[in-house]
Image (spheres, coloured by chain):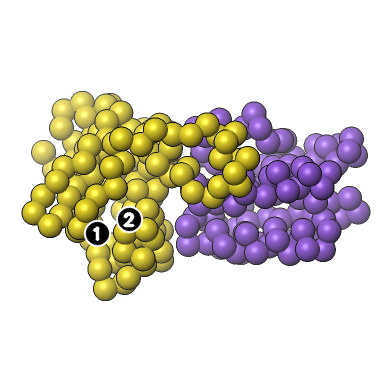
Amino acid sequence: MQIRETRHDTYSTLAPVGDLDANSSMQMDDAIQQQIDSETYNLHIDCAELEYISSAGLGVFISFMEELENAGGKFVFSNMADNILQVFKLLGLESLVTVVNDRAEVEKEYLHE
Amino acid sequence: MNRAQYTAFCSKKSLPKIRAFVESELRSLSVQDTMTHQLVLAVDEACANSIIHHHACDENSSILLSISRHDDELRIELTDQGAPFPINEYRPSDIRDIIKKRNKGGLGIFLITKIMDKVEVIPGEGMFTYRFTKFL
């Protein structure tokens, strides 16, 4: 898995490419931790090229969720394929995180902060 | 009844190959896409648990997977050595508790029990089998 990182004015985008599973979840963990270390708490996860996610991948997001919120930030997920959204739904997670369709909606989410 | 089998070495790098095997077998059994995605996920979770927690990623050990169809039910079995985790007795926590505890674990078995219609642990001589059943 690769993770493309892009910084914007009010948030950063992390775009995983490939499979986010037990084998690759530490990469995502490290990428999020680096953002937090540089005091970026608004994290947009662009799922356009994410092909698969398991509980190990979701667990990474869950483990940072409260920390981001306590610092005034949040995750926004976009461009989710059906099979990815389905995993969020199986866990009942889709109602606890912000899921939007595209980049324009991501911008709106962070403007409302 | 056709039974497809796959032996996976206990490395996290085996997980994509396990998923490819399960997906290919389910497609050959004409299982619909949504169910295939879910079943691939459940098997991936079960195998990841065995590989990471039971075998500590020891690449010299292996697990055996088998997939078979019995009329209107699909049976996926994972055979391993030693003592099983009582996966069939697991009661999932609330997702909000998991978030609060910043807990990365526990979600895999939650997903398996959510996706599968029946989860059994079949003991054997120095080994055991997790049997996951999905009604079609």
Q: Colour of chain B?
A: yellow
Instruction: From this view, report whether residue A50 is shown above or below residue A35.
Output: above
Q: Residue furthest front?
A: B101
Q: Residue furthest left?
A: B125
Query: Callout 1: helix, strand or loop?
Result: strand
- Closer to the chain start, of discs 1 and 2, is 2
Residue receiving disc 2: B50
**Which of the two discs, 1 and 2, sits closer to the camera?**
2
Give the class, few, some or many, for how many residues have Cα within 10 Å of label 2's Cα (few <14, many ≥20).
Answer: many
Instruction: From this view, report whether residue A62 is shown above or below residue B127.
Output: above
In front of the other: B107 or B31: B107
Q: Colour of chain A?
A: purple
Q: Residue at the spot x=32%, y=59% of the render? A: B54
Query: Callout 2: helix, strand or loop?
Result: helix
Q: Amino acid at mark 2?
A: Ser
Q: Amino acid at mark 1?
A: Ile
Q: Residue at the spot x=26%, y=73% of the render? A: B60
Q: Give x and y (percent) for residue B92.
A: 44, 34
Number of numbered discs overlaid on the protein picture: 2
Residues beneath discs 1 and 2 located on the same chain? yes
Q: CA distance from mark 1 to mark 2?
A: 8 Å
Q: Give x and y (percent) for residue A92.
A: 55, 30
Q: Chain of mark 1?
A: B
Disc on res. B63: 1
